[in-house]
Image: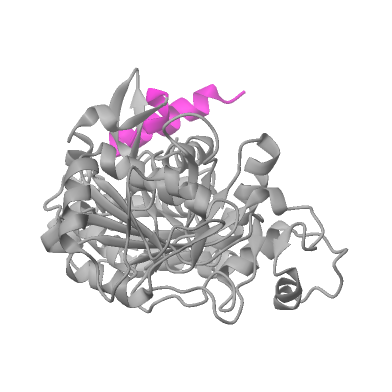
């Protein structure tokens, strides 16, 4: 996955995304790689630092300009951008460390974004001394107020090493921040997650309006990839999305995986008029269908499970009472007062109840009694690898449910109307939908008494 979609950048010319990189273990690599992606897309980007960068990094930009006065030479900047698409701005370029711009000039750049046609401004906002992990000093990081995305970087090669100066920049500050009493103690995945979220660590200096997205870098080996997943899962459990990357590896997709809070939603609000009784309460092996579906949602690998209820709400809620007691806050009921208007209203109700930090949602109906949990668990990996829509497919043909949508599709889900559910969204540029192989029998649904009788009869005949 490329950095642009992984960072969810809008890249609107004249309204630039302002991305500040902090931490250790790949800030410069991330900054210049993102700049290259932006230029390859035919858009303009300015890079800079608010502290200092190694003079050797200057060559990563096609051109650099020196800002020697109180303001930027806008004409020179325009000429550089028109020719190269990318311009590095510095206050001086003398080795060993090149000096960057004060944050007020970065803010000034955002105001001039329309005149320069800028899609993004990328900033290295502190120094890491080449170490994979760091703690900020009192004067760091230097993050402009105009920052729209703060990206703290952590090098996964630090995990397992003692917290000495060889591993950590300003180790003497990092150890007390993490409650570590001796340099011999080794840096753990739990410490990595804690550092990234710490108000004096990865969160330090974050502007109120800025998004926050940690980047776990150097996942070139299977072991580091596993470590990165552990940190990503720990962050997701606290509602924080993150990215797992190998910026130094070859290829044009440096982001290996994304992680974050997710939800599995059971659509169970319909009246089941053709069934003649509450479909949600039909029992299979002594378990109501709505209880089975809610249990599958809990076991699917999602952060939380939601069940949308409407018709027969009191009965459905009573059927779920025991499971809710076991699951605690991971299982929530969402009442859809407009359930009679169709399935889209249940999707709207679910979307309104999602946690603000939810990154993806998996929908499936209550009336697929043969749906295996193993299939649901497989939905998340394509999403982690960067795919925005995933659905079950039979013989390569995408079916309507179950279906997963990245948050890029959340506004489209809210715009649905009527009783079709989300199926129309799977038909838009259908070639980009990942179709997970599924058996026809897994996706069977039951709408009438005859279908239910036929289904249960086949199950009984298959039993020894």
Q: Residue at x 38, y 60 (%)?
A: 48
> Residue 8: in sight, yes or no?
yes
For the N terminus, the quadrant is: top left
The image shows residue 382 at horizontal and vertical percentages of: 44, 36
* Residue at 41%, 47% in the rendered image: 32
**103 left or right of 224?**
left
Residue 139 pos. (x, y %): 55, 80
Above-or-below relation of 156 to 195: above
**Residue 3 forms part of the magenta stretch:** no
Q: What kind of colouring is applied to the model shown?
A: one colour
- Overall secondary structure of the magenta section: helix
- Tell me which residue sits at (38%, 46%) in the image: 34
Q: Nearer the viewer, residue 113 or 192?
A: 113
In magenta segment, residue 462: yes
Q: Nearer the viewer, residue 212 or 381?
A: 212
Nearer the observer, 437 or 174: 174
Lateral position of residue 205 relative to residue 421, left or right: right
User: Start and end of the magenta stretch?
Assistant: 439-464
Asked if residue 211 is positioned above or below residue 392 in the image, the reply reads below
């Amino acid at each position: 996955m490329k950095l642009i979609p992984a960072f969810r950048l809008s890249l609107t010319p004249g309204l630039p995304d302002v991305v500040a990189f902090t931490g250790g273990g790949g800030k410069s690599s991330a900054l210049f790689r993102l700049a290259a992606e932006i230029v390859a897309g035919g858009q303009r980007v300015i890079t800079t630092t608010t502290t200092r960068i190694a003079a050797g990094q200057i060559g990563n930009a096609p051109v650099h300009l020196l800002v020697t006065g109180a303001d930027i030479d806008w004409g020179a900047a325009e000429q550089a951008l028109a020719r190269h698409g990318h311009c590095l701005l510095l206050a001086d370029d003398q080795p060993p460390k090149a000096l960057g711009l004060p944050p007020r000039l970065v803010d000034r750049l955002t105001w001039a974004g329309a005149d320069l046609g800028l899609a993004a401004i990328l900033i290295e906002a502190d120094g890491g001394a080449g170490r994979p992990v760091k703690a900020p000093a009192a004067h760091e990081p230097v993050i402009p107020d105009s920052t729209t995305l703060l990206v703290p970087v952590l090098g996964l090669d630090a995990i397992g090493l003692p917290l000495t100066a060889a591993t950590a920049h300003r180790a003497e500050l990092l150890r007390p921040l993490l409650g570590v009493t001796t340099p011999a103690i080794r840096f753990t995945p739990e410490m990595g997650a804690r550092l990234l979220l710490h108000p004096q660590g990865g969160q330090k200096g974050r502007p109120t309006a800025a998004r926050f997205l940690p980047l776990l870098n150097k996942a070139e080996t299977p072991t580091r990839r596993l470590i990165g997943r552990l940190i990503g899962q720990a962050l997701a459990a606290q509602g924080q999305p993150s990215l797992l990357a190998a910026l130094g590896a070859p290829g044009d997709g440096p982001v290996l995986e994304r992680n974050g809070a997710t939800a599995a939603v059971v659509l169970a609000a319909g009246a089941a008029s053709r069934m003649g009784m509450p479909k949600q309460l039909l029992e299979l092996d002594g378990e109501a269908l709505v209880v089975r579906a809610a249990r599958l949602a809990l076991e699917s690998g999602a952060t939380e499970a939601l069940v949308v209820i409407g018709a027969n709400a009191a009965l459905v809620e009573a059927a779920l009472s025991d499971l809710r007691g076991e699951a605690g806050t991971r299982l929530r009921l969402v009442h859809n007062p407009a359930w009679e208007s169709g399935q889209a209203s249940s999707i709207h109700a679910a979307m309104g109840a999602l946690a603000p930090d939810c990154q993806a949602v998996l929908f499936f109906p209550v009336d697929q009694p043969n749906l295996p949990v193993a299939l649901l668990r497989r939905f998340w990996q394509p999403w982690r690898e960067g795919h925005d829509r995933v659905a079950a497919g039979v013989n390569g043909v995408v079916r309507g449910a179950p279906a997963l949508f990245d948050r890029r599709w959340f506004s489209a889900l809210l715009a649905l109307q009527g009783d079709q559910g989300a199926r129309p969204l799977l038909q838009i540029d259908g070639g980009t939908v990942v179709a997970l192989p599924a058996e026809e029998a897994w996706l069977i649904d039951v709408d009438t008494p005859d279908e239910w009788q036929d289904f249960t009869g086949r199950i009984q005949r298959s039993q020894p």
